[in-house]
Amino acid sequence: MESYLLANAESVVARARAGDPAALEELYRAFEVPVYNLSRRICRTAEDAEDVLQETFFEVCRSIGRYREEGSLWGWVRTIAASKALMRLRRNKYRDTDELQEEIVGHRREDAALRMDLEAALERLSETSRAVVWLHDVEGYTHEEIAGMMGKTPSFSKSQLARAHARLRRWLGEEVAP
Amino acid sequence: MTHLSMEALLGLREPGREPGDAAAREHVESCPACRAEMDRLDQRVARLRALPALRSTRDRWPLLAARVRDERRQRRLRTGGLAGLAAAASIALALGLGSARPIAAAGQQEIRQAMARSQALERALTQYDPEARVLDGRTAGIAQELEDRIARVDRELEMAELLGRETRDDRLLKLWRERVGLLDALVDVHVTRASNVGL
């Protein structure tokens, strides 16, 4: 993805800024998979992730003139995508009900000593916890950056990450006897 | 023996050191259980990063491209629609509508001049047809910024029409002048740049 775009980034961005539809499509094709992947990992449904994908690139097309080329193009696109995905979570108000449900269902399933694969375990985390895990551990955002995007404190991000890892450890059957 | 919490273990993976890190690190070195926990944490993160990318099953580009085209068309219409706003303002000025205190003749004249100048610059831009031309990235960025600021002024002009009589005319004059300045700069960005590079 980036290896292709890096070689052409400057000219593609310049053409996109000038409104060249072909350049806008090149940007879309270069980043659609990582943007969708990030959105899908954060959002609950594929439909929500597709909406985030579309909103992200609509914003990219509108704002490409404001991209300052100070950081990487992917970093800029990714931050737009992450913000849109987190906005979608806030809008859908998943968090509160899911965490409660996770507590109830989680304990019941632990009793059954189910062992899951990583995909299933990740999917089972609450939206907020999964977003923090993905943004921190995979995308490499700091707790301060995540807190800024979520409108929370860095401590909130840290505790969400710790709780999520404790749960993943249990669900993956990685706990060791004391 | 007290082992480290998950939060403490995660803290050790952060690039910046926090108070207590040295003691925690020392503990991990000497405690096989915490060392194993740390290794599992590292492995779990590595496995997360190695998960295959999920892909959309639908191609969203055609829909998105249509939306982008539509948005651009709307923006052009918005800019063109200002001619109508100017005309309405002209009529209001001519009739002296809604003005509790009479606008000084010189003030009216200034607003009319600013509107006329704005319309002339709009026509110049339309004739130049910037959307059909290719700009370098920096110039296009400046043009985009100016267009955004013009759009903001346009919104403020619409709001100014709703202001109380006492403040409306002063505000209109200020905004029309600002609009002329921005349009002047925009024409300059397009035309000067084009003549420099012979486009």
Image (cartoon, coloured by chain):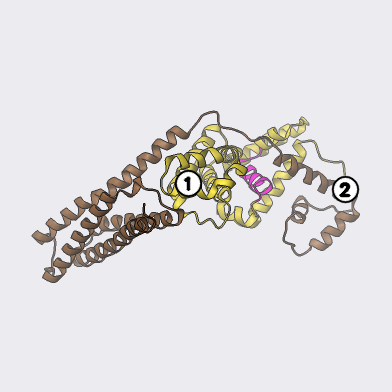
Chain colours: A yellow, B brown
x, y percentage for residue A78? 57, 47
Q: Which residue is mark 2?
A: B33
Whether A174 is among the magenta residues is no
Amino acid of disc 1: Val
Who's the residue at 62% across and 34% down the image? B54
Is residue B89 placed above or below B103 in the rendered structure? above
Q: Is residue A100 left or right of residue B90?
A: right
The answer to which quarter of the image holds residue A165 is: top right
Q: Which residues are magenta?
A: A125-140
Asked whether A163 or A10 is in front, the reply is A10
Q: Are marks 2 and 1 on the same chain?
A: no
Nearer to us in this view, A161 or A50: A50
Calculate the distance from the C-alpha at mark 2 to the C-alpha at mark 1: 47 Å
The reply to whether residue B162 is in sight is no
**How many tags in the picture?**
2
Q: Residues within 10 Å of mark 1 (few under 14, many from 20)?
A: many
Q: Main secondary structure of the magenta part?
A: helix
Left or right? Give the position of B183 relative to A96: left
Residue B125 horizontal/vertical position (percent) = 28, 53
Q: Are marks 2 and 1 in contact (CB under 8 Å)?
A: no
Q: Residue at x 78, y 31 (%)?
A: A113
Q: Chain of mark 1?
A: A
Counting other residues with Cα less than 10 Å from the Cα at mark 2, is it few (<14), some (14-19), or many (20 or more)?
some
| Above/below status of A165 relative to A171 | below
Label 1, secondary structure: give it. Answer: helix
Q: Which mark is residue A133?
A: none
| Chain designation of label 2 | B
- Image coordinates of residue A35 in percent, x first then y, are 56, 41
Residue indicated by mark 1: A60
Determine whether the residue tagged by mark 2 lies in a helix, strand or loop.
Answer: helix
Q: Position of residue B120 (x, y in %)?
A: 21, 57
